[in-house]
């Protein structure tokens, strides 16, 4: 049976893009959750878009959010890699 967990977060921390871990209550994790929810909402908007121009505009916003999520999730040492 395939496991869908690593047990590494049982101590209240989670991984980031780069070395180290941060608290699951860290402000960056809250920001990432909010950015993810915004992207999901935009995906719903895009699915109902009546015009191709609107759908492309929303998709670009999702791509921008995805890039921002990479920067937020990266450690300061490697943030430039995800910029």
Image (cartoon, rainbow, N blue to C red):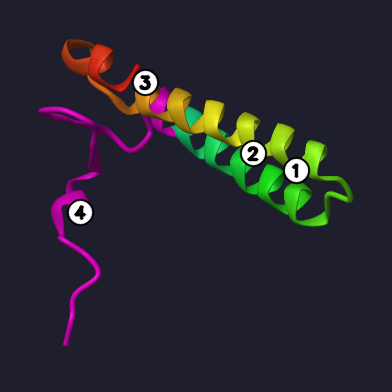
* Number of residues whose C-alpha sits closer than 10 Å to that of mark 2, classed few (under 14), some (14–19) or many (20 or more): some
Residue 55 is marked as 1
Closer to the chain start, of discs 1 and 4, is 4
Instruction: Give the mark nearest the N terminus, 1 or 3.
Output: 1
Compared to residue 7, the image places residue 76 above or below, namely above
- The spot of residue 66 in percent (x, y) is 48, 33
Q: Residue 71 carries which label?
A: 3
Cβ atoms under marks 2 and 1 closer than 8 Å: yes
Q: Mark 2 points at which residue?
A: 59
Position of residue 47 measured from the top left corner of the image (x, y, whole percent): 75, 56
**Magenta run includes residue 15:** yes
Q: Which of marks 2 and 4 is in front?
A: 2
Which residue is the site of mark 4?
10
Work out how far the residue at label 1 is from the one at label 4, CA to CA, in angstroms. 40 Å
Select label 1 or label 4 by which is in front.
1
Q: How far apart are marks 1 and 3 (CA)?
A: 25 Å
Name the quarter where the N terminus is drawn.
Answer: bottom left
The magenta span reads 1-29
Q: What element carries label 1?
A: helix
Q: Where is residue 9 in the image (x, y as percent from the top left)?
A: 21, 50
Mark 3 is surrounded, within 10 Å at the Cα level, by few (under 14), some (14 to 19) or many (20 or more) other residues, namely some
In reply to whether residue 26 is colored magenta, the answer given is yes
How far is disc 3 from disc 2 in space, using C-alphas? Answer: 19 Å
The residue located at (89%, 50%) in the rendering is 50
Q: What element carries label 3?
A: helix
Q: In this view, does 76 lie above or below 72?
A: above
Q: Which residue is drawn at 67% across and 49% down?
A: 43
Quote the CA–CA distance across marks 2 and 1. 6 Å
Q: Which of disc 3 and disc 4 is earlier in sequence?
A: 4
């Amino acid at each position: 049976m395939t496991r869908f967990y690593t047990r590494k977060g049982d101590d209240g921390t989670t991984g980031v893009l780069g070395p180290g871990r941060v608290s699951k209550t860290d402000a960056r994790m809250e920001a990432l959750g909010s950015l993810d929810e915004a992207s999901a909402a935009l995906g719903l908007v895009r699915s109902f878009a009546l015009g191709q121009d609107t759908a492309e505009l929303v998709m670009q916003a999702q791509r921008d959010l995805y890039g921002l999520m990479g920067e937020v999730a990266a450690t300061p040492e490697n943030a430039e890699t995800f910029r």
